[in-house]
Image: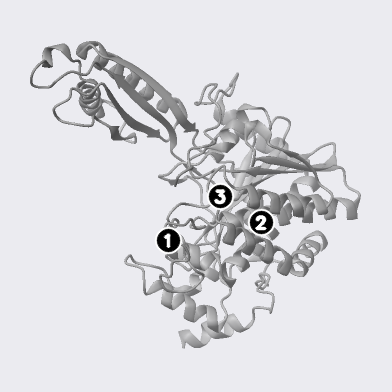
Amino acid sequence: MLRVLILLLCASATVFGQTEINPKVKPDRDKEFVITELNKKFPIYKSVARDIWGYAELGFQETQSTERLQQVLREAGFKIETGVAEMPTAFVATFGNGGPVIGILAEFDALPGLSQDSVADRKIILEEGAGHACGHHLFGTASVAAAITLKDWLIKTKKAGTVKLFGTPAEEGGAAKVYMVRDGLFNNVDAVLHWHPSSANDASPSSCLSIKQTIFKFYGRSAHAAAAPHAGRSALDGLEAMNYMVNLMREHVPQETRIHYVINKGGLAANVVPDYAEAEYMVRHPDARMVEEIWNRIVKAAEGAASGTETTMKYEVISGSFNLVPNETLARVMYNNLKVVGGVLYTAEEVEFGKKIQATLTTKFPPLESAAQVQPFKTGGFFPASTDVGDITWVVPTTGLGTATWVPGVPAHSWQAVATGGMSIGYKAMNNAAKIIAMTGIDLFNNPAILDKARKELDAYVGPGYHYKSMIGDRKPPLDFRKGK
């Protein structure tokens, strides 16, 4: 009986793959415009997403992907500023004039080593090739589609206001958004909207872990380890002394803290006193201010280790991002639009695809029909990971959502995510996300009082007199961090 119900639901999906509108929530005229426009242009945006899925370019190397998105925006009448914040693949596309100013985020980088065809079994396209295992090809395309739809609505209604689409590269480790915030690109933006591929439909406000990533480098003096050990000073000794002190420190930090490290270099031969050693450290905590405090203590441990071993130490901050500041005001608006659009309905072929994908999973997974459901709204959500969206949320009221892009149970950064994101299920969820973002933007243009309330909520969180200062200092974007991978 359940299978029959699923197939009946699936049969109601249209030829273009858009889902049915929730019959309990009737869209108004503005939102009907959004639905009509995005359904009509669905084949175009699907083609764009598929192109970027095929490019599968790594962080800061997304030359084809960024140009594909810029091309679509340029043809739609957006003014585009390229190479912003000293990043060649980053851009800002702007349409309109005056306020309110609504920003939309667009990501488009892939991940290394996850090449996969859009089929339900492991099939590598290119050995050691990259793949869109986090669905950023869908992310960027849906955001562009939403921005263009909002532009068309502004023209149609003769409304004042500005749409800004932020093309943000290298989310997977490059923290490009941090550099964009640091350079003031989000100044004078009233709200920022974003989304991310997921295996469920959810728009609840949530936070995450703040993170700071650093390379600690120790310099010693080499010598023959047997004939003249007294003449050497081991850089590895300095590094190990640091690691020991940091590990002792774990007892004396808040329990939510996470400290990870790996020794990248520790010498080349056992009979040579190492004159160079380095380790990569990551510090995480739900509050960015606590991350800074703990990081400063780690630096002191490194300095003490160098002093005690008569080595020298230098460090380089690689990246750092703040925790997400949840904004319930904006999240409720977005959630109401998620309820209008609803989830993803599978066709019979997609049900079979989903079953095959779930058969490859080793963890417990929800039923396929959960892709058509909207998760209940809840506050206080938290996920134990980090994102460079966090920095934006400390300076501009921001909210986002996830749509059921992947078969229920499929984790991000997996070949199953690449496969689902490259076929019809992923494109349906992409279309849903574009509708929800555009509808939310319309609500904010039509009711600026929501923006005032969202701003007050953010100000209350960060506290009076707060001034944003990034964790990365004055370092330049690490444009080569994915090269050779």
- The numbered dot on residue 267 is none
Q: Nearer the viewer, residue 111 or 126?
A: 126
- Quadrant in the rendering for residue 287: top left
C-beta proximity under 8 Å, tags 1 and 3: no
SS type, badge 3: loop
Q: Please, is residue 421 above or below residue 222 in the view? A: below
**Mark 2 belongs to which amino acid?**
Thr
| Residue 433, image x, y percentages | 64, 59
Above or below, 360 relative to 207: below
Residue 429 on image: x %, y %: 60, 65
For image coordinates 85% across by 36% down, the residue present is 98
433 sits left or right of 261 in the view: right
Residue linked to disc 1? 127
What crowding class fits label 2: few (fewer than 14 Cα within 10 Å), some (14-19), or many (20 or more)? many
Residue located beneath label 3 in the image: 109
**Is 78 in front, or is 83?**
83
The kind of residue tagged 1 is Glu
Q: Compare marks 2 and 3 and give the one earlier in the sequence.
A: 3
Q: Secondary structure at mark 2?
A: helix
Q: Position of residue 282 (x, y in %)?
A: 37, 33
Up-down relation of residue 239 to residue 169 (above or below): above
Residue position marked by numbered label 2 in the rendering? 141
Secondary structure category for the residue under label 1: loop
Q: Nearer the viewer, mark 2 or mark 3?
A: 3
Residue at the far left in the pictured view: 226
Q: Residues within 10 Å of mark 3 (few under 14, many from 20)?
A: many
Question: Cα distance, mark 1 to mark 3?
Answer: 18 Å
